Amino acid sequence: MSEVDLEAKIPNNVGLRDNKRLMKALETWQPAFLEWWKDLGPSDFNEDQIYLRTAVGVGKGGWAHFDYVKMPEYRWGIFLAEGPEDRKIHFGDHLGEEAWKEVPGEMRNRLRRLIVTQGDTEPASVEQQRLLGKTAPSLYDLRNLFQVNVEEGRHLWAMVYLLHTYFGKDGREEAEALLQRHSGDEDNPRILEAFNNPIETWVDFFCFTTFTDRDGKYQLAALAESAFDPLARSTQFMLTEEAFHMQTGENGVGRILHRTAQLEKEGKDAKSEGGIPFDIMQKYINYWASASMDLFGGEDSTNAAESFSMGLKGRYREGDGIYSDPRALEQNYKAEIPTPDGKLEEKEIPLRRAMNALLLDSYVQDCKRITMRWNRDLEKLGTDFRVVFPSKRFNRKQGIYAGHYYDPEGTPITEAEWNAKIASWLPSEEDRAYVKSCMKPVYEKGKIANWIAPPPTGVNGQPFDFEYVKFH
Amino acid sequence: MTSRLVYVCEGGDCTEKGSVELFEQLRNLLHEWDPKEEKIRVRKYPCFGGCEHGINITIWPDKIFYSHVKPEDLPDIAAHIKGGEPVKRLMGVVKPDVEEFIWQMLDCPY
Amino acid sequence: MEFQTNPEQYKHWRLSFEGPIARMEMAVAQDKPFGEGYELKLNSYDIGVDIELNDAVQRIRFEHPEVKVVVVTSAWDKVFCAGANIRMLGKSTHPFKVNFCKYTNETRLAIEDSSRFSGIRWIAALNGICAGGGYELALACDEIYLVDDNHSAVSLPEVPLLGVLPGTGGLTRLVDKRKVRRDLADVFCTLPEGVKGKRAVAWNLIDGTFPKSKFQEKIHERAEALEASLPARSESPEGLALLPLNAEISENRFRYDSVDVEIDRQKRVATLTIHGPKGDQPGNGAAYLAKGCDAWAIAACRQLDDALCRLRFDELEVGLIRLQTRGDAEALLQVERDLLADQGHWLSREILAFWARTLRRLDLTARSVFAVADEDSCMAGVFLEMALAADRIYALDSEEKPVRFSIGPLSNGSLPMSHGPTRLQVRFLADPIKADRLATEQPTMTAKEAEEQGLTTFLFDDIDWDDELRIAFEERASLSPDALTGLEASLRFAGPETCDSKIFGRLSAWQNWIFIRPNATGEEGALVRYGNPEPARFDWRRT
């Protein structure tokens, strides 16, 4: 593809036209991306017209331009949020210094690792979700899935932009490698384990977008505080889109619960009507919530401390000034740490080393807000069931609680107790088989599968029975 | 730099109801009074969880939670921020646990 | 610091010539120390004394081709040399101590180098007590004679008296050069009063003793006999005068005709640019003699040597040297070919040996060195050899103005590293055939070909060039200076060891460690407490 075509095809506010290096790198990478999309992006729907939102600018309205488009012709763009020219670093050891417009040499490797790890999750989730279109419960949901997919693709572009522009030859190699690793590939898997299992059902998809994408949101939010200005501005813009993905998940789970409550209210048994019983939903939530919490990294981490002190990752909303000590030197974080005999003991961790734990706390708080929202709806529908967000100790494979047993409330239990109760806490094979059996596509305009309620409103002011996907 | 904050919700529901425009209007209203954000900063917040009562606006550390905010309410809100009385009619709409959520988030012990 | 001097300015040495025999009398002026707060008693030395010694060695080689034997002795009665001044060491910062030791080591190696390559023999005529660094100086000479006066002894008392090592090569030269039996060396090094007379001869610490009354006479006899056994270095006594260097030294720059060092203090990077020969150059030793020290091959090497010394001593915070080369590759290679073809001439030999020595000074400089082969660079011959001495070589892959790499004739053994092999052999330790092929074929190649041959570390096109370089330099500058010193010293000298390289790689490394340990330099350390009424107190734990 020529330079002229590239410039026209790629909406951007990063001066692509004048950025010879980026242009040259994209000449090779962009075709490779399209190949990847065709091979590993959503299966079977590349010829269909999807009612999608495309970001064509960062200003008001610019990021939400709606139209029908074939996915491979989607205009993946490169955007940085607008920000002050003279931004100062607002936390860590470099507090008060000018934010960096270029990568400081001594931080190149660490920054590259952060960006590559973040970037790797974006195409990974597209790969994980590639078969979901075949069992979409409605055209509305099918469209939302693809919206999530193309935007994860754009987030990959955002990270690749940083790699191409600021990390030279290594950066280009890393950008290529982002397309070469594949979710679940035995020899060349995605970096984070949670991104190597396929998302097989829509219940998983909605839970994933609620909980796992939310981890992404918090990681992005921490990077959005970064002293490296291009990273901060790039991730700030990604956060706008990420909010939509979580909304998709949040509403999706809410609509399933809503439907189950409706069935219950009508005196029907959810399972015999092809709905998803509350207890199965709770198990899926337990599973995805705990797996997502594992993505935050160790609660006591020198690595996290270094990223903070160097100014690479801030705390959630650090820039809003809600923390009393922007250097985070004077305080300790109180953590409940398991003792060898299985009890919990309060220990103080120097705050900088507890940055992952702190970010996880913000995440948990946010997740509790969502559960609250679901429960309000259940309350309105007159159901007794309430969703409970599991304790951050429950079912952890990473961090200080890994290797210990806790119930969903976080109370320490024995291995025997765990084994006895696991089937009531986490989805069993049987549960998974049942949920899978419910997944039948509904491609008819205005229709919806029986296990999920329609959304209260459609996309972009359109009704639910709008033709969100026009099959070819 | 002040740490007094006005957050305008930019969750899905609030955005549908025009929170982005509202955010800009409020920021412009306060800009003349406090051009350098020395007294208060106006920011967007991802979602407070009071979606059915949007558009929601919070003021911290005052712990004021305004709901159902419409453009015509902005002058009163601005007056409050500048030192006047809180706008009672917009308060106490969401459930206390929704309010509590955001204060817990912001009253970070660190 | 000023490293330039000449015999008229010497404060501490008396240099005299009698035909083929030169005499160097150590006459250290007690009241003229280089620094403040100490006196140079008993012919003890500091850096100022050693700068003169180094200058004298250099001048004997270049200015006095008639000299075949040098007698090193003392002008004072009963004292040859008491070694490095302890008060000076006690007052010095760690970096200064390390640089001081390195410089004095290099000076002693230059004495040995002149014996090996210039056919000059050195006689240490110890006419009085000879302790520590004094005996190390003697060890650098080919022969050692001690006055037999029932009083004078040779000793290395550093361990028992000061809690440090005889670090100017003493330990290594004892067992590696003089092959003193290791257990006897152990005894000798822990005897503060040293060893004298027959025992010293029996242990091979010295080559002989002469009674006091006949000492000067016997030394002279020995010098004459030795001289007579050696071939003449030159047919004519005419030497090449080493005139003062033309240098402009300002705060952030030292600038000479062919070498330019610019310092970026904020980035802690010094850019060292070396320029190749311009205009006609002498075609052989005789022509060099006629032309004088302004000839490029001599001047550039002196300038580089001076610049490296200044960087080492005066610019401690410069962590990284960016090495740039400029000039016409063919002109440079022609200079090298001419010198190599005329090795029969003493001056050609001296010029080549001087380059070899100066490049070793670069190898031994404890700063990161990144060579930058940009589009204006001259990556040929000795300049390419300098790049090979660097820790990394960054090359530009430019289509408009391709960078060329030319291996020159000197890379085939004329510029050995301190541990013996050539830089190509060290670089391709895993592939000696390739090292040999490159050294003998001496190809000219593009940067890309050089990359394929493994001569460059990184090859970047012009789009990436500036940024990759900036990042590489910033990244390097951020790493621990101590760890880098250890890293570079460990990686630069792959392959076998020699006595020379052991001095730096083993003895100095240990010494530098001991220098920072509380047992030497803590408040109650031996080096600090030396001469005070309270004894040193040690932390007895061994590592």
Image (tube, rainbow, N blue to C red):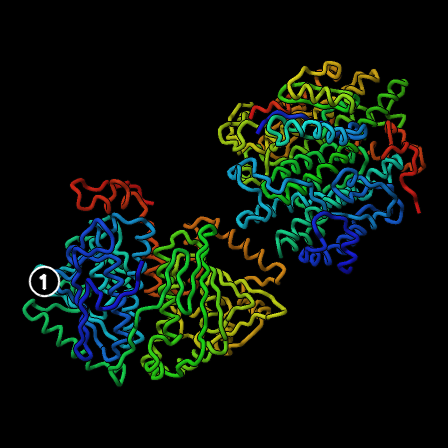
Measured as percent of width and height from the top left, residue C381 is found at 47, 74
> Can see residue A452?
no
Classify C393 as above or below C436: above
Q: Is residue C319 left or right of residue A326?
A: left
Kind of residue sitting beneath label 1: Asp
Q: Counting other residues with Cα less than 10 Å from the Cα at mark 1, is it few (<14), some (14-19), or many (20 or more)?
A: few
Splitting the image into 4 quarters, where does residue C169 fall? bottom left
> Can see residue A177?
yes
Residue at the extreme left:
C213
Q: Which residue is mark 1?
A: C77
Q: Is residue C300 left or right of residue C444?
A: left
Splitting the image into 4 quarters, where does residue C314 fall? bottom left
Measured as percent of width and height from the top left, residue A6 is found at 77, 55
- What residue is drawn where x is 24% and y is 82%? C237
Viewer-proximal residue among A199 and A432: A199
Measured as percent of width and height from the top left, residue C425 is found at 46, 69
Measured as percent of width and height from the top left, residue C534 is found at 18, 40
Q: Is residue C286 left or right of residue C86?
A: right
Splitting the image into 4 quarters, where does residue C485 fall? bottom left
Viewer-proximal residue among C65 and A57: A57
Viewer-proximal residue among A301 and A163: A163
